[in-house]
Image (cartoon, helix red, strand yellow):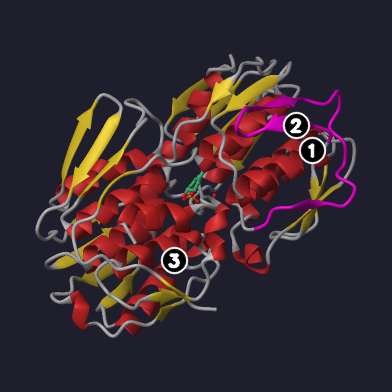
Amino acid sequence: MAHLLPSSPGPVTAEVLVPGSKSETNRAFVIAALADGPCTVKGALASRDSDLMIAALRSMGVTVEGDVSDGLRITAPQRFTTAASGIDCGLAGTVMRFVPPVALLAGGPTHFYGDPHASNRPMAGLLDALRQLGADVDSDRLPFTVTPGRSASNVVRVDSSATSQYISGLLLVAARLPRGLRIEQVGATVPSRPHIGMTVHMLRQHDVHIDEVDDNTWQVAPGPIAARDMTVEPDLTNASVFLAAAAVTGGSVTVPSWPAVNQQAGGLFLDIARRLGATVDQDGDRVTLHGPERLQGIDVDLHASSELTPVVASLGALARGTTRIRGVGHIRGHETDRLAALVTEFTRLGITAHETDDGLVVEGVDSPTDLAPTEFETYADHRMVHSAAILALRVPGLSVTDLACVAKTMPNFEADWLAAVGA
Ligand SMILES: O=C(O)C1=C[C@@H](OP(=O)(O)O)[C@@H](O)[C@H](O)C1
Ligand SMILES: C=C(OP(=O)(O)O)C(=O)O
């Protein structure tokens, strides 16, 4: 069923408290599940991806008590069990890449499955690394079964050019392996580096000793992961959607509780917005974005913050001139092939856009109200909804085919968006 998205005749003015970071939440859950005592996680995101992570860990013997609003109490099992009915990864990259390494600690085979499209997401590099650690793995994509075995080595060579999540997944379990782990990244280049930085930072807060030998080598000492309580920051990539509403309407949106120092790729949005012509003020932990009369197209490398691509593409479509996004070829393996999806839907709407080897080129539209509003296909991808929602503010009548997929990281998106844009 098509869902009409709100347009905004005037500037959007709002203050929006965004929910917890998906990336931090699912790392916090895995770290707590591997720690040497109970940990409380506060500020966690409640969403499909985090629910899938909790269900996965529970089915391996982890105890999760309490609720997200008061803090979740997570206790590692004496020994990880084999999940009797398998582990549902949904479409969550963090579940499909962070949990299989934990299955190395289980006493037998663990089966992993997911949504239909999850089978298109890259897994081979991680599964190959698990084989190097002695596991038997019966496929190179979902669904697959990991059966741990005796490891001949504590060194893995992994091509992580398809996703940074292979490195993060291996780092998370590394200290718990009998001899620790040395990870040697052998791919041409690793995307989304801040996400690896987040993994390293969070593990160090639990006394895990990680030596970043060089840009492509991590040496993790064996040892306990210290139990400590954690507080999850707001999700800055999701915050960018709301800030973008101000950017395209000449309005002002404030996000409170913005962590001054953070490891989130979404934090890079503020500089990108400035380059597009927005003004960004930071007053303590409050960030306010003021939109200009008209944004200006930019040439931008989003290799480090590729999950911002759908938002930046929409900003480019509403800016003056051309916007070129580079360094994001790997997002063809995200929730959907995001480059193809954005170009297809933009073109259908009348926006000139094309794919390049490693990104997109989008021509800014002079009169968005002249575009023929369409039904924007979302391909089960939450960030395609975000992209459409930003465009719709200036293209009255635009709808999306499916709104429910926002539950992946922001189940309350519709209500929060309607409140923010004053619809
Ligand atoms: O580890 C994480 O939490 C994530 C890493 C990134 O994946 P890629 O390295 O595949 O871009 C990012 O895009 C994704 O949204 C979340
Ligand atoms: C790529 C994304 O998610 P995942 O964690 O499933 O990889 C995303 O949220 O943009």
In the image, 263: left or right of 271? right
Query: How many residues crowd around disc 2 within 10 Å: few (fewer than 14), some, or many (20 or more)?
Result: many
Residue 129 visible in this rendered orientation of the protein? no
Image height of 254 relative to 354, above or below: above
Indicate which disc, 2 or 3, sits on the residue closer to the N terminus: 2
Disc 3 to disc 1, how far (Cα)?
Answer: 32 Å
Image height of 184 relative to 343, above or below: above
Asked if marks 1 and 2 touch (Cβ < 8 Å), the reply is yes
Residue 405: x %, y % from top left: 55, 62
Q: Main secondary structure of the magenta part?
A: loop
Mark 2, residue position? 64
User: Which one is in front in this view, the residue at disc 3 or the one at disc 1?
Assistant: 1
- Which amino acid type is marked by label 3? Arg
In what quadrant of the picture does the N terminus appear? bottom right
Residue 291: x %, y % from top left: 16, 52
Disc 3 element: helix
User: Which one is in front in this view, the residue at disc 2 or the one at disc 3?
Assistant: 2
Q: Which span of residues is magenta-colored?
A: 61-90
Asked whether mark 1 and ligand 2 are closer than 8 Å, the reply comes as no
| Residue depicted at 74% across the width and 16% down the height | 37
- Which amino acid type is marked by label 1? Arg
260 or 169, which is in the foreground?
A: 260
Residue 320 visible in this rendered orientation of the protein? yes
Mark 3, residue position? 338
Disc 1 to disc 2, how far (Cα)?
Answer: 7 Å
Indicate which disc, 1 or 2, sits on the residue closer to the N terminus: 1
